[in-house]
Amino acid sequence: MYPHSRDSFIEFESDMFSEPFRGASTASSSGTGSLPPASGYQLCTPRSLSALEMFSFDASALSITSATKTNIWSKDYKSSRERLFNHQEDEEPHRDIEPPQASPLPAPVQSLAFWRDNGASFSVPSTSRFFVIKSYNAVDVEASIENRIWTSTNLGNKRLNKAYCEARAEHGSIFLFFSVNCSGHFCGLVEMKDKIDFSRTSSVWVEKSRWKGIFPVDWLIVKDIPNRYFQHLRNPLNEHKPISNSRDTQEIPHDIAISMLKIYCSFK
């Protein structure tokens, strides 16, 4: 049905798109002249034309991504292992997230236990402060024991009030060692229970108009102890003088005050 189809198909396989079929050379030798250059479908047999149409395509219709060869010597090259562990760095910058830090807990306040006159114990926190009280007479001391209040000079009250606020902020207390001027002994230990009320006065004192302001106190120990038992204790806050030589509202260091408390509790 198709002359020269076998020969033409063989020549088509050797070069499908450019090799002329055998009949073209025969036509040239018969005197019709040479054929124009082979191109397109003009030189194809019907069978080869069908094959050509099967393989024809529009290259512009395809979108094939060209694969470029990876340069492993480039400074930007990352191996598969590096890409695995650094993929987050490629997506977004690394951020150091610091874990929330818990605020440090305050150190517990230690306390020492001592004994009252009635046999009950009282505690002395390590943040407590201590002062000497010098009374002008024993009558005011007795009024303080009975009414559970005390007062000092204007300067002394301000000093005690400031110390009380500072000690309470640190969970401490204010303790007062009482002594009457020229008595030759200490007569008791008192705990200051609240701030000073500068707007109030009291009529229980010998000199009623002299004292302004009052504050509540708790008498822990009422005991006369001669000064000689404290003579070895010297106050660095008062030019290293003996404790018995203190002025009114003179502060005493914590360690010296604890030694005084031990003497108070052991003296009979």
Image: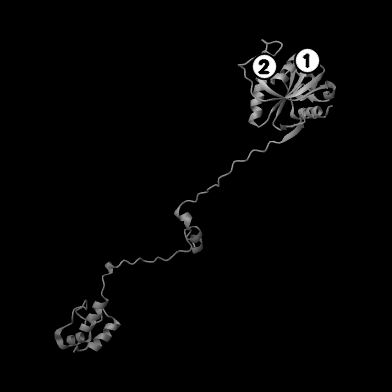
Residue at mark 1 to residue at mark 2: CA–CA distance: 18 Å
In the image: residue 66, left or right of residue 83? left
Q: Position of residue 89 (x, y in %)?
A: 48, 54
Q: Position of residue 135 (x, y in %)?
A: 74, 16
Tag 2's secondary structure? helix
What residue is shown with label 2?
155
What residue is shown with label 1?
181
In the image: residue 2, left or right of residue 209? left
Residue 41, by quadrant, is: bottom left
In the image: residue 167, left or right of residue 222? left
Q: On screen, 12 above or below 174?
A: below
Instruction: Tell me if label 1 and label 2 are in contact, CB under 8 Å.
Output: no
Q: Position of residue 61 (x, y in %)?
A: 27, 67
The three-letter amino acid code for the residue at tag 2 is Leu
In this view, the residue in front, 256 or 262, is: 262
Choose the circle earlier in sequence order: 1 or 2: 2
Q: On screen, 167 above or below 75?
A: above
Q: Residue furthest left?
A: 32
Q: On screen, 94 above or below 152?
A: below
Please give the name of the residue rendered at 77% of the width and 19% of the height, measured from the top-left corner. Answer: 179
In the rendered image, is residue 103 in sight? Answer: yes
The colour scheme is: one colour
Q: Nearer the viewer, mark 1 or mark 2?
A: 1
Residue 247, by quadrant, is: top right
The three-letter amino acid code for the residue at tag 1 is Asn
Please give the name of the residue rendered at 67% of the width and 16% of the height, measured from the top-left corner. Answer: 155
In this view, the residue in front, 206 or 112, is: 206
In the rendered image, is residue 45 in sight? Answer: no
Q: Position of residue 267 (x, y in %)?
A: 83, 27
Q: On screen, 22 above or below 220?
A: below
